[in-house]
Every structure is written in structure tokens, then in C-alpha cells.
Image (cartoon, rainbow, N blue to C red):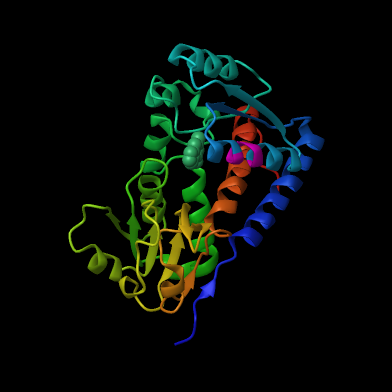
Amino acid sequence: MSEAKIIDGKAFAAGVREKVGRQVAALTKAHGIKPGLAVVLVGEDPASQVYVRSKGKATVEAGMESFEFRMPDTASHDEVLAKVEELNADDRVNAILVQLPLPDQVDEAAIINAIDPAKDVDGFHVINTGLLSTGQDAMVPCTPLGCQMMLRAELGDKLSGSNAVVLGRSNIVGKPMAQLLLQDNCTVTIAHSRTRDLPDVVRGADVLVAAVGRPEMVKGDWIKPGATVIDVGINRIERDGKMKLVGDVDFAEAVKVAGAITPVPGGVGPMTIACLLVNTLTAACRQHGVDVPEG
Ligand code: GUN
């Protein structure tokens, strides 16, 4: 059997970032607006530090203003809340992202819901999840938005009517992903670690989005021949004495069965950052009541 097409998320993301760069330049030229993204990082988690650094770099490369705030992992709930309120009131800041997870003493849901929904580029505020699930203009979470872009590019009209299985039910990926697939007329199943006969459920998927955070859990014989597989997992494992990044899908097996598949790394990851820039631009335009410029 021939091998699956590899969906190059890195190249796709580079194209999205270049387009946002052109749109930002047009926005600044026409209206004097320079979108600003503020990222708040509480604590020293090494993976989060890497993400925050790449977000800041990508923001500046797209011609936007980047604000970074680091707080110690001993920061109190009220201190983090005060930072969010300060950023809500700052007109230079169009977009706010509080990096998750937060330390135990900070109430994550309360912090997310304290962010001005218009500046909530993560799309995690209950107002935005409600807007998304009722089909209204929402800020859409970046990772699912990136997956939707790749699926639309890959499948076009064939997405409509497909059986889509989302493996994972997180607020960050699984639930919003299911909403986006529904909007694209898929028949959507949300499966998870407690789903009965999970391999059989996954075998029904024309489109599989795996976001469970378990290294190489999805085996080749779980995949319907020709299916489109989007692997959201980023798991660090040790193999042959070396640290390695793997997805939630066993890539070596799946590539022999699927029709198209995203690799890890180089698939969904780069698209998440690209979509953060898209959302920051969208937020700035909405706040100023202007259309998003053509790219
Ligand atoms: N931690 C892991 N993924 C995300 C994300 O998409 N947004 C935020 N804020 N934190 C995260």
C-alpha cells in the first residue's frame, strides 16, 4: 500500500504567518494600528518558557507589539488577577494570553473568565466558548483553528458529511475542535480514555483528530484506510537513550494506512502559533471596528 501524504504544518504555518505580516502592515499603514499581544507566564515550567519565547518572537516578526510578563510560581491568585485587569485596561494590548497550566493557588477558570472576552485570543472565556457553540463570531482556540485550516485545505468539499472522531475532550482542543467540525458539516464523535471499544470507534473515522496526550496510543490498525489524521499530541519520551517528541498516533504504523497525516514535530504545533497571530490581528481589528485587511 502506498504511504500517506504528509501534511506539512511547518510550511502551512509559514504561509499563514507571512499573510498575517502583510495584513498587519496594511492595517498599520491605513489606520495607524499596531496590534499588541500580551503573554503572561506564571512559574518556571521549561516547556511553557519555550512556548512563550516562540510566541513573542513570532509576534514581533509579524510586525505586532509583544508584551511579556513573568511572575514567580509563588504569585497569588490576586496578583495574577490584578495583572489581567491591568492588561484589560491597557489600550496598547489587543490580545491577552495567560499561559496554562497555572500554579495550584491560582484559580485557572476565574483567571480565564477575568480576561476581557474581546482580548481573549485563546478563546477559553465562557463567552467565547458560548459564541463558538452557537455559531456566532467568537475568538476560536488556536490549536483547533489550525487543525481546521489544515483539514479544509486537505479535504475541501469532502469534509462535509465525513465521520469525524475527536479523541480527547479538553477545553483547549477536544471540545472546540468538535464544534468546528460540526460547523463544517461533519458527523462528530468525541471519544476519550473511557470510551468503550475505542479502537473500533476510531476505525469509523474518515477524519481523526487525536488530542489525548498519550504517546503513540493510536495504532495503525485503529485507522480507517485512507483517513485524514491530525495528531495534536506533543509527548516527550525516551527512546534508545535519547529524548524524542512523539504524537498521540503511532506515526510509523499510521503512515502506512492513512490517506494523509500530520507529523510530530512539524504538524499541528507550528499552526498553533500562526493562529495566535491570526487571532491577535482579528481581535485588534474588531476592537477598532475595522475590517481585517486583505492579505
Ligand atoms: N498551554 C498549553 N496549550 C495552551 C494554549 O493553547 N493556550 C494557553 N494559554 N496555554 C496553553
Q: Is residue 136 visible?
A: yes
The residue at 44%/79% (across/down) is: 256
Q: Is residue 134 above or below residue 7?
A: above
- Quadrant placement of the N terminus: bottom left
Q: Position of residue 217 (x, y in %)?
A: 35, 61
Q: Is residue 221 above or below residue 47?
A: below
Whether the magenta-drawn stretch holds residue 36 is answered as: no
Query: In screen coordinates, is 223 left or right of 277?
Result: left
Query: In screen coordinates, is 167 left or right of 294?
Result: left
- How many marks the image carries: the answer is 0
Residue at the extreme right: 29
Q: Nearer the viewer, residue 42 or 26?
A: 42
Q: Position of residue 248 (x, y in %)?
A: 40, 58
Q: Nearer the viewer, residue 163 or 269?
A: 269
Q: Is residue 139 visible?
A: no
Residue at the extreme bottom: 1
The residue at 65%/37% (across/down) is: 53
Q: Is residue 295 above or below residue 42?
A: below
The residue at 47%/56% (across/down) is: 238
Quarter holding residue 92: top right
The residue at 48%/85% (across/down) is: 2
The range drawn in magenta is 50-54
Residue at the extreme left: 196
Q: Position of residue 274 (x, y in %)?
A: 62, 48
Q: Position of residue 7 (x, y in %)?
A: 55, 67
Q: Is residue 193 above or below residue 230?
A: above
